[in-house]
Amino acid sequence: MTESSFSRVGVVGLGTMGAGIAEVLARGGLAVVGVEVNQDALDRGRGHLEVSTGRAVKRGRLTEEAQREILGRTVLSVDFAELGDCDLVIEAVPERLDLKRRVFAELDRVCREDAVLATNTSSLSVTDIAVSTRRPTKIVGVHFFNPAPVMKLVEVIRTVLTEPDAVARVAGLVRALGKTPVTVGDRAGFVANRLLFGYLNQAVAMLESGHATRDDIDAAMTAGAGLPMGPFTLMDLIGLDTCQGVLDAVHAETRERRHAASPLLRELVTAGLLGRKTGRGFYPHD
Ligand code: CAA
C-alpha cells in the first residue's frame, strides 16, 4: 500500500494521460475517483484502464485478483460532485486554458476547502489556472510523462502562490507511487519538455530539408544515441498536436528559433494526422 498523505484522489479527464494517471494511483493502493464529461468518454476511459491493466496481467506483471482490486478501487462517474471527498484532484483534460479554467472553477466549488488541486498541463501556465480559483495556494502542477504507467519522472510545479506544504505532499505522493519527482518553477516546458522539444523540432526540420529520411533519423537516435524511441516514433506517441502546443508555449516564452514549430509539423496537425491516436502521423499506425 502507498504511504501518502492523500488517501482519496480524483482524476478529471480519462484520456490517455488521465487514465494512465488513474491506473498509477489505483495500483499504488489509493482510492480513485475518475470523472469524465459524458458517458461515452467515461466508457472510453474505463476501456483504457481495462486494456492497460489487462496487458500487465498477460505479461505476468499483475495477477487477475490484483487487477480486480485495482478496478474495484476506481470509481468512475460523470458527476463532479463525486470529487467532494477527495483530498487531491488531478486534472487531465485537453490543453485549452478556457477549458481548464472552467474545470478548476467547478473543482473549487465542489471540493473540500483543504483539498489540493493539481493540473497535468504540459504547456499552459499553472499560475494562469491558479488565479482562476479561490484557493491559489493549493494549486500545483503535476506533470506525468507518456505512457504514465511506465515513465518514472513526474514534474511537480510550484507557482509563486503555491504553499510549500502542498508541493511537499504532492512530491511525497509521487515518491510513494515509486516515481521520481522533480520540483520546478512555472516556466513553459518546465524542465524536460523545454529540453526535449528543441531536439524533436530539429528532427522535423532535418527531415523537411531532405538531410535524412524519417527512418534513418529514428535509427540514428535509437542505435546511435541509445534512446528507446527515435524522434518521429516518439512524436507519434506523444501526439503531434501536443507537440505543437508545447513548442508554441515554449517559443512564446523563449523566442528561440529552435522552438519555432517546423512547418511540416504544423501541416500534419492541420491535416489531422496526429500520430497513434488518429492512426497516422509521421508513420502509419494500424
Ligand atoms: N501503457 C501502459 N504500459 C505500457 C504502455 C502503455 N501505453 N506502453 C508500454 N507499456 C509497458 C509494457 O507493458 C511493458 O511493461 P512490462 O515490462 O511490465 O511488461 C513496458 O512498458 C515496456 O513496453 P514494451 O516492451 O511494449 O515496449 P518498449 O520496451 O519499446 O517500451 C516505452 C515502450 C516504455 C514507451 C519506451 O519505448 C520508451 O520509454 N519510450 C520513450 C517514451 C518517452 O520518452 N516518453 C516521454 C514523452 S514526453 C511527454 O510525455 C511529456 C509531454 O508533456 C508531452
Image (cartoon, rainbow, N blue to C red):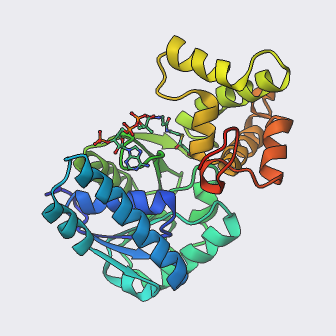
| Residue drawn at 31 percent across, 81 percent down | 85
Q: Position of residue 128 (x, y in %)?
A: 64, 61
Query: In this image, 44 relative to 170: left or right?
Result: right
243 or 247, nearer to the observer: 243
Q: Residue 112: x percent and y percent?
A: 37, 80
**Snapshot quadrant of residue 50:** bottom left
**Residue 86 place in picture, x, y as percent:** 32, 76
| 22 up-or-down from 104: above or below | above
Q: Quadrant of residue 90?
A: bottom left
Residue depicted at x 75% and y 33%: 259
Q: Is residue 120 left or right of residue 264?
A: left
Instruction: Kindly give the residue lying farthest to the top in the view shown.
Output: 224
Ligand 1 location (quadrant): top left
Which residue is located at x 17 percent, y 62 percent? 64
**In the image, is residue 83 above or below residue 151?**
below
Residue drawn at (31%, 43%), measured in percent from left and top? 179
In this orientation, which residue lies closer to the viewer: 232 or 162? 232
